[in-house]
């Protein structure tokens, strides 16, 4: 080997060991830097050259400086990050709803319902006691206020979720733009050879943060750019971000508003199944909205079932004038109560059905009571032979006309669309045998106003005059029927606590609209379901954290910097450098000896 070639060989060894020492030093310097991946130097021998009839090595060169990463492990870690983000957010939302319902304390809806119906039971024991009547009114007001408050807090949580969705979407947008920018920088810096390790570490950090919000997968292109997908939908392609946006739209379900996350360029909906965004989208509908819907359902049942009994009850003095609480728009008053175009009725959770009720007219001077039946036709059929239609079905106008045709009773519709029923002078009016539910729905002689948890309240007249409470009911002495024309004689005994006893039983009475469950059972089931989900979410959050920590540990074992390993590398590279320097020194001495001979 010529001495010049030997010098070059030594130079390559010096250069390679010097670069390796620099890489080891950089690893040591960034041992505690978040997101840093340990870099490894790969060396290879320079191709041999032929000389003196054989092949002689020409030294060493650095083939590459690459990060120590496991691509498959990185994908699993992204899934672990998304899972942890979703599990933690699930637990936070469920815990918030559980706290709002407060069933573990003494102020939950179950307690309120028990106190309310117990007050009716106490009233049944002393129906003429003013204090008992006042207690019923107070408990009813407390129940209504509590239900409205709980619904308001649930709505606030839903609003908070919407704000979180909007702000998180904005952060996701920023991350997508940064990832696209990092792609451009990496492609430009690498130019098809080598790796820009610092830029790649930064890009990995951005993708990891993105995974906290959405479930992502990545595909690296030959150019070094990283495509990012949510499900099967790409959101970053090379150096371009499609962007995402939060959109809230009116909806017939989801309590009036539907929210979606769409791509910004062509409004393609993203199927986000994990991460904080995935949790917020899921819990908004399956937790918060469903809880609001169930609360509305329970409130509607309480309103309707209590009102159904109360509307057929009587107080101590009888009623001379009653006005319903449900206002009906002018355009709806002549439409059948079951007509789909009747907007007032369509907004109600519980509507009247085919059936009838009796109107009882009592002569207060003689005590004589006469009764007439009012039929409510809501079968959705008209004509002979019957065909689908609503032309002959009962409307508010026709119902008022039927009641108005009863002797000593007049019925009208007020200016704001409420049914008003008046008894002639010297007479009182009451109702019974209502199989249609029309009286309760229209709010005639009811206890509650409103239709669900948004507007449940005590009827204003009762709040100011508890004496109007219908605690009693008339029980017929015979089974004789009543005609639909002039009232027929009706013999009945007054039971002063009859209505109060029936209302007290409403809490535990199975309801068809609740799948055969009582109001108490249905609400307890709702609360228990949330409690079970909360417990499961707590376990899932703990498990997700353990999985993510395990994946982090695996990543650290591969990409993390070991100070012991780097110390060994430094010693090896230092020895290599020293030996190379010594080699060059020997070659230099040989060169000097040769030059001395030439002189």
Image: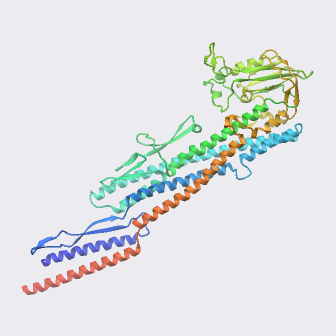
Side of 127 where 412 appears, left or right: left
**Residue 509 in sight from this viewpoint:** yes
Instruction: Identify the coloring.
Output: rainbow
Q: Position of residue 199 (x, y in %)?
A: 36, 60
Exactly how many numbered labels are in the figure?
0
Q: Quadrant of residue 202?
A: bottom left
Q: Residue furthest front?
A: 479
Residue 480 lies, in percent from the top left, at 83, 20
- Residue 152 vs 374, above or below: the answer is below
Residue 464 visible from this viewpoint? no
Q: Quadrant of the C terminus?
A: bottom left
Residue at position x 36%, y 77% in the image: 568
Q: Residue furthest top?
A: 384
Asked if residue 599 is positioned above or below residue 41 in the image, the reply reads below
Could you say which quadrant of the image residue 437 lies in?
top right
Q: Quadrant of the N terminus?
A: bottom left
Residue 161 lies, in percent from the top left, at 56, 47
Residue 54 in picture, x, y percent from top left: 12, 73
Question: Which residue lies at the image location 59% right of the left edge and 51% below the top edge?
Answer: 93
State which quadrant residue 117 falls in.
Answer: top right
């Amino acid at each position: 080997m010529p001495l010049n070639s030997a010098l070059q060989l030594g130079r390559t060894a010096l250069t390679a060991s010097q670069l390796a020492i620099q890489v080891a030093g950089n690893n040591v310097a960034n041992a505690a830097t978040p997101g840093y991946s340990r870099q490894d130097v790969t060396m290879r021998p320079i191709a041999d050259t032929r000389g003196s009839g054989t092949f002689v090595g020409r030294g060493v060169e650095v083939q590459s400086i690459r990060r120590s990463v496991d691509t498959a492990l990185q994908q699993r870690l992204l899934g672990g990050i998304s899972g942890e983000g979703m599990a933690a957010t699930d637990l936070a939302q469920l815990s918030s709803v559980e706290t709002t319902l407060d069933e573990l304390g003494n102020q939950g809806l179950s307690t309120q319902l028990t106190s309310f119906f117990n007050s009716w039971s106490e009233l049944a024991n002393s129906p003429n006691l003013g204090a008992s009547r006042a207690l019923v009114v107070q408990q009813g007001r407390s129940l209504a206020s509590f239900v409205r408050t709980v619904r308001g807090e649930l709505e606030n949580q839903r609003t908070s979720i919407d704000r979180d969705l909007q702000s998180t979407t904005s952060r996701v947008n920023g991350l997508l733009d940064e990832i696209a920018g990092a792609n451009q920088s990496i492609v430009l810096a690498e130019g098809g050879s080598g790796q820009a390790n610092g830029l790649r570490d930064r890009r990995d950090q951005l993708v990891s943060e993105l995974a906290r919000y959405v479930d992502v997968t990545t595909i690296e292109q030959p150019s070094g750019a990283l495509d990012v997908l949510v499900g099967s939908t790409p959101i970053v392609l090379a150096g371009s971000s499609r962007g995402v946006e939060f959109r809230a739209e009116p909806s017939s379900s989801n309590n009036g508003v539907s929210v979606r996350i769409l791509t910004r360029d062509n409004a393609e909906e993203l199927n986000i199944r994990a991460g904080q965004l995935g949790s917020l989208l899921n819990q908004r509908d399956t937790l918060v909205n469903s809880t609001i819907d169930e609360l509305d359902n329970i409130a509607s049942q309480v309103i309707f079932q209590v009102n159904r009994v109360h509307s057929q009850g009587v107080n101590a003095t009888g009623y001379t004038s009653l006005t319903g609480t449900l206002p009906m728009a002018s355009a709806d008053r002549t439409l059948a109560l079951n007509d789909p175009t009747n907007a007032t009725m369509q907004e109600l959770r519980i509507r009247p059905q085919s059936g009838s009720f009796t109107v009882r007219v009592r002569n207060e001077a003689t005590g004589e009571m006469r009764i007439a039946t009012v039929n409510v036709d809501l079968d959705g059929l008209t004509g002979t032979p019957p065909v689908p239609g609503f032309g002959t079905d009962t409307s508010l106008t026709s119902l008022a006309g039927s009641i108005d045709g009863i002797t000593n009773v007049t019925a009208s519709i007020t200016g704001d669309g409420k049914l008003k029923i008046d008894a002639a002078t010297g007479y009182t009016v009451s109702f019974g045998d209502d199989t249609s539910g029309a009286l309760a729905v229209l709010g005639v002689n009811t206890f509650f106003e409103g239709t669900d948890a948004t507007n449940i309240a005590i009827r204003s007249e009762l709040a100011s005059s508890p004496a109007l409470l219908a605690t009693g009911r008339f029980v017929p002495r015979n089974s004789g029927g009543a005609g639909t024309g002039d009232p027929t004689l009706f013999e009945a005994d007054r039971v002063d606590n009859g209505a109060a006893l029936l209302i007290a039983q409403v809490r535990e009475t199975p309801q068809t609209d609740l799948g055969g469950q009582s109001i108490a059972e249905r609400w307890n089931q709702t609360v228990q379901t949330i409690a079970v989900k909360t417990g499961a979410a707590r376990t899932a959050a703990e498990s997700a954290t353990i999985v993510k920590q395990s994946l982090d540990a695996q990543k650290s074992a591969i990409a993390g910097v070991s100070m012991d390993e780097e110390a060994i590398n430094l010693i090896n590279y230092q020895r290599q450098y020293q030996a190379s320097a010594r080699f060059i020194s020997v070659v230099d001495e040989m060169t000097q000896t040769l030059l001395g001979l030439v002189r």
